Amino acid sequence: MDPPKMSFKEVKKRTILQGLRALKAPAVIGVLVTSIFAIPSLKWGPGHELDHLELFAGQCSVTRGEFQEGRTSSVAMDLDHNPETMNMLTNTGFVSALYHATCLRPGSGCLAAPVCSSFVYMNSGTARRSESNPYGQECYESVLSGNEEISQLGEFKPRTKSTQTISLVDHYYDADGNRRVKGNGNLKASQAYPLGFGVALAKLRTRHAKENRRRALRLIKQHARKSQIMKRCTRKDGLWLKCANLNPVLEFLA
């Protein structure tokens, strides 16, 4: 008797988990993905696949570019669009972002737009930077490379009068004494993608679409041939659960 044919949903889940194992991802990430696929109200199938996902989308310049290139199955997520379902600091928003990520088709695109730096306190759980240890945990490549870049900035400092220092966020403490930040007008103005950027990026993706898909399918086949098992209860998992605060999400999905 022939084995039962796997559904599109099961194939999709297996493909993602195989990729995570090949990347040696923490087991807790696999648990998150499995939990997403266990939600009965969510749908997977050829009609639900995405060409592009833009997170922290702002003015959606990249998504607009994708639409102009004919890839209309593109999704943009931003807190300003829907504070209830697109706030990734909430369980619902985080799960929604994960679901859309699992819907991306091979060779598709995903862009996350926040400023990425190991020199912000929000990343201190990994970087381990502090006033007493500004160099942080240099065993991480991102921290080490950041230190090297900063050390070389002096060579590019203009020899003229220093430019004005602009603060992009306002720091404050909430009623419970927790430290918070809120983007001010400078942050919004400085971090908005110009519409031309989104169009140019979408055109670039169109130019390399066939090659991107070939590479993606080749990786999927390579991952399927590997049989390594994702280890559980490792120290890395403990750090992810603690520093990424994933326990509330797992409880929400349970």
Image: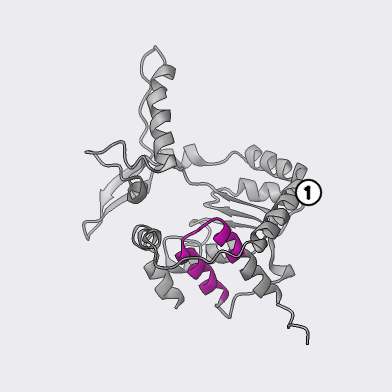
Where is residue 183? Give x, y as percent.
39, 46
Q: Nearer the viewer, residue 43 or 34?
A: 34
- Residue holding disc 1: 210
Q: Quadrant of the C terminus?
A: bottom left
Name the image quarter holding residue 243: bottom left
Q: Is residue 254 above or below residue 123?
A: below
Q: Is residue 36 above or below residue 164?
A: below
Name the image quarter holding residue 12: bottom right
Range of the magenta residues?
16-37
Q: Quadrant of the N terminus?
A: bottom right
Where is residue 144? Give x, y as percent.
40, 36
Along the horizontal axis of the image, is 102 left or right of 144?
right
Residue under the point 51% across and 65% down: 230
> Is residue 50 something that shows in the picture?
yes
Judge whether residue 18 is colored magenta: yes
Judge whether residue 105 is colored magenta: no
